[in-house]
Image (spheres, rainbow, N blue to C red):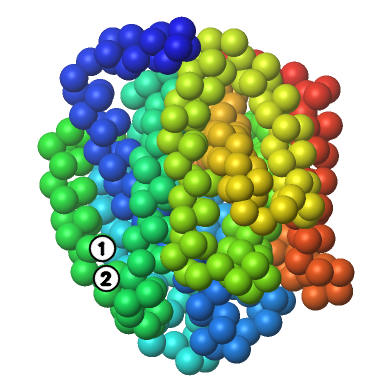
């Protein structure tokens, strides 16, 4: 309660204009995650409807991740160079996302489906560097806290999305559910554009490209930046494997309906709505490593337990406990990346770190698909747990300090 009270007092002291900006960006992130997390709920239906195997499912998830990770870097450079266009970047992201889902909905060809999934990755890249850099620049003294509030927007949507999409799948065919997604995307884009223009304005300043590249070059040689990026990569690998195979485990192996799959994913996401800002605030006060180090080991153990826990109440409780840390670690490691970066390259530093992270995470779902095919789906959770524990071991000797 003490941490929550201090967090609320800290937020109240931010000022009206900054709070408006934070609310708009967090709300937009909520819209983005409606689309991002819909894919996990629809994945079992898509697999069955298109006759895909576990390796192909892993390939789809890897394609989305490599697209967002690769494009995060150039998108971040543009977001730092063209600050005045950040509202355009953010408003375009839902449109691209809605078009991608519509394309998946009409596709009967695996190659075309991969192309549509790459568009989802492009939309993710349009959003995150611009959004996180805007918040980091406006709230340097509360960086992890505002990144976590941004994450809360995602968690709220993640909590609603599985139930919403799961319910729609009971009523409509999965292809129709995907096709309808373009309508709310267009509405969200218009509202975001109007709101962001009012709050951010349209500044025209541009940064020298040569200076930007020089600062990025220096950052790419920084031990703390490299270490955090690699650790983020292993954390992302574990999360990707869980997001890919937990819904399939629930539906195919435990016989849960799409609605029950959505309900369990709601447990996973919903708890993080409350834990993210509290743990991020503690990391602002106590230090990143103080919060991150034990959290990696604990989350790794939770992942391992998925392989052996009994279905029913025990599984539901484990999913809830996992939700406490599931997105929290990503927010704090993102803040740690921006801590060691110059204020003029916040979007670029996030993009560079994400590029490195995604290169590491790329093979994880495909590897998990091979392991699942040979040893059973429980082996994917053992893989996830091992990746998180290894990330904790890498973090232990790393020195992290805030610039």
Spot occupied by residue 296 in the image (x, y as percentages of width and height): 72, 33
**At 24% across and 38% down in the image, what residue appears?**
24
Q: Position of residue 36 (x, y in %)?
A: 44, 59
Location of the C terminus (image quadrant): top right
Label 1: element kind: helix
The number of callouts visible is 2
Q: Residue at x 48, y 21 (%)?
A: 278
The image quadrant where one finds the N terminus is: top left
Residue picked out by circle 2? 182
Relative to residue 147, is residue 179 depicted above or below?
below
Q: Is residue 173 above or below residue 98?
A: below
Q: Is residue 113 left or right of residue 232?
A: left
Image height of 93 relative to 117, above or below = above
Labels 1 & 2 near each other (Cβ < 8 A):
yes
Q: Nearer the viewer, residue 26 or 44?
A: 44
Q: Can the viewer see residue 166?
A: yes
Q: Residues within 10 Å of mark 1 (few under 14, many from 20)?
A: many
Tell me the residue that label 1 is attached to: 185
Identified at 39% across, 31% down, the residue is 149
Residue extending furthest toward the right: 375
Point 41% across, 9% down: residue? 6
Residue 225 is marked as none
Image vertical order of residue 77 relative to residue 150, above or below: below
Q: Quadrant of residue 344?
A: top left
Looking at this view, is 170 or 268 the one in front?
A: 170
Q: Secondary structure at mark 2?
A: helix
């Amino acid at each position: 309660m003490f941490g929550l009270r201090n967090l609320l007092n800290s937020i109240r002291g931010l000022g009206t204009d900054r709070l408006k900006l934070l609310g708009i960006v967090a709300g937009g992130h909520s819209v983005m995650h409606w689309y991002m997390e819909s894919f996990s709920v629809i994945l079992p239906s898509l697999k069955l409807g298109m006759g895909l195997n576990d390796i192909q499912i892993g390939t789809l998830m890897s394609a989305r991740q490599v697209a967002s990770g690769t494009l995060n870097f150039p998108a971040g450079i543009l977001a730092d160079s063209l600050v005045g266009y950040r509202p355009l970047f953010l408003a375009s992201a839902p449109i691209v996302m809605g078009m991608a889902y519509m394309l998946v909905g009409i596709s009967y060809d695996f190659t075309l489906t991969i192309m549509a999934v790459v568009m989802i990755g492009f939309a993710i890249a349009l959003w995150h560097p611009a959004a996180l850099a805007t918040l980091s620049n406006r709230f340097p003294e509360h960086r992890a806290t505002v990144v976590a509030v941004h994450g809360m927007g995602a968690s709220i949507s993640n909590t609603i999305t599985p139930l919403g999409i799961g319910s729609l799948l009971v009523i409509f065919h999965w292809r129709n559910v995907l096709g309808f997604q373009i309508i709310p995307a267009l509405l969200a884009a218009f509202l975001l554009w109007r709101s962001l223009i009012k709050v951010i304005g349209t500044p025209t300043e541009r940064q020298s490209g040569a200076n930007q590249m020089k600062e990025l070059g220096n950052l790419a040689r920084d031990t703390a930046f490299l270490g955090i990026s690699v650790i983020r990569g292993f954390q992302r690998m574990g999360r990707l494997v869980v997001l890919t195979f937990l819904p399939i485990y629930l539906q195919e192996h435990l016989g849960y309906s799409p609605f029950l799959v959505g309900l369990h994913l709601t447990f996973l996401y919903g708890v993080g709505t409350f834990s993210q800002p509290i743990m991020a605030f503690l990391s602002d006060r106590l230090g990143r490593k103080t919060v991150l180090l034990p959290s990696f080991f604990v989350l790794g153990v939770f992942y391992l337990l998925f392989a052996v826990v009994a279905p029913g109440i025990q599984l539901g409780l484990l999913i809830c406990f996992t939700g406490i840390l599931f997105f929290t670690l990503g927010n704090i490691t993102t803040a740690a990346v921006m801590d060691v970066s110059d204020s003029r390259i916040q979007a670029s530093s996030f993009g560079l770190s994400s590029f490195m992270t995604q290169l590491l995470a790329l093979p994880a779902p495909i590897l998990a698909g091979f392991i699942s095919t040979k040893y059973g789906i429980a082996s994917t959770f053992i893989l996830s747990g091992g990746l998180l524990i290894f990330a904790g071991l890498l973090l232990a000797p790393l020195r992290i300090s805030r610039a």
